[in-house]
């Protein structure tokens, strides 16, 4: 699965307590040759490590060990290297497996616990900035789930929707003298009201920024009858046929996506400047980590590709650079940035990823504090 599938409900399900062990395997991957040639070898090594960990764990019975191995083998057999992104996450118990492909790198790791490791999933979704795009016409509406890199049609909440076909009525034509405009038809208004109703249900379940795409008359009528339209963050006035390809849609949306990103970059910069002025600012991993743990962060800003391995030393974080990391060392956090992102979101903070080097003066990560 891709990160846009990570709804609040699914995240809650992934985090629930399971019979020990719930196995989480993470590793960086590569999208293109020749770099991706190493991915299969790396995965085999991690699967071997997972097998050894399971066999050596006195809390894992022989039957459970064999069942989880079988689930991991099934997951590995299902992988398609052509769909690789920047990281792979495999989750498995004796009853199931899940495959997640992330547009954000993750360290090599095998974790046995009573719940799945979710920090890399959460951080990748936050970085991908998922959104909904509704293509709307007089007789058809489709919903697309998108990120900065991709868009695909979403078959959720009853979408796609098509209006019932109106039977040809010669008496009506004789009375009007012409075929009535689709956008003057009460049937069209009712259809778009239905679209709005279905869309509100989707947004209630999975809130995301909404973009609207369609010709001007369709968007104008949708504005009149829709409650969702007023909250749309962007729109593209262009034809939206029923067979609109996701790749074409992403191309059409790109200017609106870039404009919104630029708007947020300025807004975040202004909020951080104001926070410094009123002494409600934290900068750098150590300060931000302390503030997140105390639940004080209202806004967290992180550079897009910032990753750092650290060692926890007497309530402080110290960067680990040249030394080899011992996987059994509990003081080492290889993905502390993802951990901070997940914890900040859990505490109700807003999280935004910003351009590389834009926070260089503040240690690549900064926060506006609530108090």
Image (cartoon, rainbow, N blue to C red):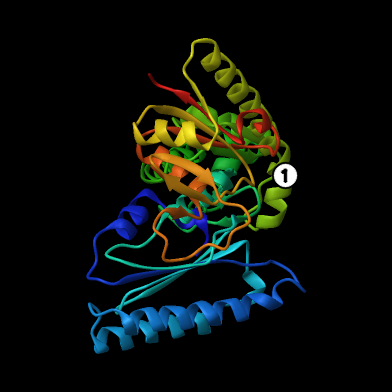
- The answer to which image quadrant residue 292 occupies is top left
In the rendered image of this protein, does residue 315 appear above or below residue 23? above
Can residue 186 be seen from the camera position used here? Answer: yes
Q: Nearer the viewer, residue 360 or 228?
A: 360
In the image, farthest residue toward the top: 278
Q: Nearer the viewer, residue 269 or 151?
A: 269
Per the image, label 1 sits on a secondary structure element best described as: helix
Can residue 200 be seen from the camera position used here? Answer: no
- The answer to which image quadrant residue 107 occupies is bottom right
Task: Locate residue 244 relative to residue 46 in the image: left or right.
Answer: right
In the image, farthest residue toward the right: 34
Task: Locate residue 353 relative to residue 113 in the image: left or right.
Answer: right
Q: Residue at x 41, y 30 (%)?
A: 291
Q: Quadrant of the C terminus?
A: top left
Q: Residue at x 54, y 80 (%)?
A: 45
In the rendered image of this protein, does residue 303 appear above or below residue 116? above
Task: Locate residue 136 relative to residue 161 in the image: left or right.
Answer: right
Q: Looking at the picture, how far across and down is residue 325, in whole percent?
A: 53, 62
Q: Looking at the picture, how far across and down is residue 365, in whole percent?
A: 57, 35
The image shows a total of numbered marks equal to 1
Q: Residue at x 31, y 57 (%)?
A: 15
Crowdedness near tag 1: few (<14), some (14–19) or many (≥20) residues, C-alpha within 10 Å: some
Read off the residue under disc 1: 252
In the rendered image of this protein, does residue 265 appear above or below residue 127? above
Task: Locate residue 1 relative to residue 111 in the image: left or right.
Answer: right
Q: Looking at the picture, how far across and down is residue 350, in whole percent?
A: 46, 32
Q: Looking at the picture, how far across and down is residue 195, in whole percent?
A: 46, 43
């Amino acid at each position: 699965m891709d990160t846009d599938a990570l709804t609040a409900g699914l995240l809650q399900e992934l985090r629930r307590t399971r019979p020990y062990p719930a196995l989480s395997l993470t590793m960086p991957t590569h999208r293109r040759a020749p770099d991706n040639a190493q991915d299969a070898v790396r995965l085999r090594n991690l699967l071997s490590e997972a097998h050894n960990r399971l066999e050596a764990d006195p809390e894992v019975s022989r039957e459970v060990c064999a069942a989880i191995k079988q689930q991991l083998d099934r997951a590995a057999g299902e992988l398609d290297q052509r769909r690789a992104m920047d990281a792979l996450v495999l989750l498995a118990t004796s009853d199931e497996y899940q495959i997640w492909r992330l547009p954000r790198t993750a360290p090599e790791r095998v974790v046995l616990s009573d719940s799945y490791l979710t920090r890399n999933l959460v951080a990748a979704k936050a970085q991908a900035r998922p959104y909904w795009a509704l293509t709307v016409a007089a007789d058809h509406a489709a919903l697309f789930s998108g990120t900065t890199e991709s868009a695909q049609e979403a078959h959720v909440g009853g979408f796609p929707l098509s209006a019932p076909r109106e039977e040809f009525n010669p008496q009506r034509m004789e009375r009007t003298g012409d075929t009535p405009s689709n956008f003057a038809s009460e049937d069209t208004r009712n259809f778009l009201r239905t679209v709005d109703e279905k869309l509100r249900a989707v947004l209630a379940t999975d809130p995301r920024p909404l973009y609207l795409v369609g010709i001007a008359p369709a968007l104008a009528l949708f504005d009149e009858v829709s409650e969702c339209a007023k909250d749309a963050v962007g729109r593209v006035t262009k034809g939206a046929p029923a067979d609109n390809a996701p790749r074409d849609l992403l191309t059409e949306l790109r200017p609106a996506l870039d404009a919104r990103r630029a708007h947020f970059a300025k807004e975040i910069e202004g909020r951080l400047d104001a926070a410094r002025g009123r002494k409600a600012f934290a900068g750098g991993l150590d300060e931000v980590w302390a503030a997140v743990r105390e639940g004080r962060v209202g806004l967290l800003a992180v550079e897009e590709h910032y990753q750092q391995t650290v060692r926890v030393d007497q309530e402080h974080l110290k960067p680990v650079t040249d030394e080899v990391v011992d996987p059994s060392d509990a003081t080492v956090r290889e993905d502390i940035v993802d951990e901070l992102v997940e914890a900040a979101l859990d505490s109700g903070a807003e999280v935004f990823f910003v351009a590389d080097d834009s926070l260089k003066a503040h240690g690549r990560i900064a926060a506006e504090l609530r108090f």
